[in-house]
Image (cartoon, rainbow, N blue to C red):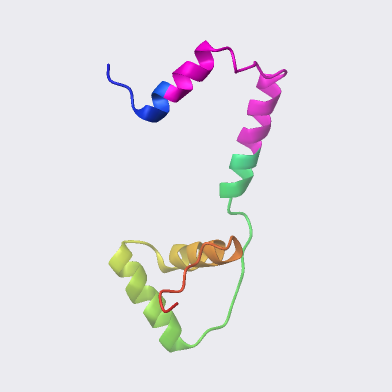
Amino acid sequence: MKLSKEEKELLQSVEKGEWRSVRGVKKHIRCFKDYARETVRKDKRVNIRMSQKDLICFQKKAMEEGLPYQTLISSILHKYINGRLIDKAS
């Protein structure tokens, strides 16, 4: 099996003994699973007012993407608050 450069470096690091076991690994795994579950859970409703023109634009774009328009709006808001919404005009 051929390994990539990154895989070779990782294998060498393991073979040199540079890795240590994590104490309480099951607790850490459980904690990260909880974080992931909370991240994707959608349990809150929000009502917003917007112009009919904007709503129609969202609906058209969502249809092009094959998504419900509410999902598209939620995705855009999520990207914005996490600093990942990129302005193409810049």
In the image, residue 38 sits, relative to residue 14, either above or below, namely: below
Q: Position of residue 76 (x, y in %)?
A: 49, 66
Q: Quadrant of the N terminus?
A: top left
In depth, the one of 9 and 84 nearer the eye is: 9
Overall secondary structure of the magenta section: helix
In depth, the one of 24 and 11 nearer the eye is: 11
The answer to which image quadrant residue 44 occupies is bottom right
Q: Quadrant of the C terminus?
A: bottom left
Horizontal side of 28 relative to 53 (left or right) equals: right
Residue drawn at (47%, 68%) of the image: 86
Q: Position of residue 3 (x, y in %)?
A: 33, 22
Horizontal side of 55 relative to 42 (left or right) equals: left
Q: Does 44 appear in magenta?
A: no
Horizontal side of 70 relative to 4 (left or right) equals: right
Q: Position of residue 52 (x, y in %)?
A: 45, 87
The count of marks equals: 0
Q: Does 28 appear in magenta?
A: yes
Residue drawn at (39%, 64%) of the image: 68
Residue drawn at (68%, 32%) of the image: 31
Q: Position of residue 39 (x, y in %)?
A: 60, 48
Boundaries of the magenta span: 9-34
In the image, residue 69 sits, relative to residue 82, either above or below, namely: below
Residue drawn at (72%, 19%) of the image: 24
In the image, residue 67 sits, relative to residue 54, either above or below, namely: above
The answer to which image quadrant residue 61 occupies is bottom left
In depth, the one of 90 and 42 nearer the eye is: 90
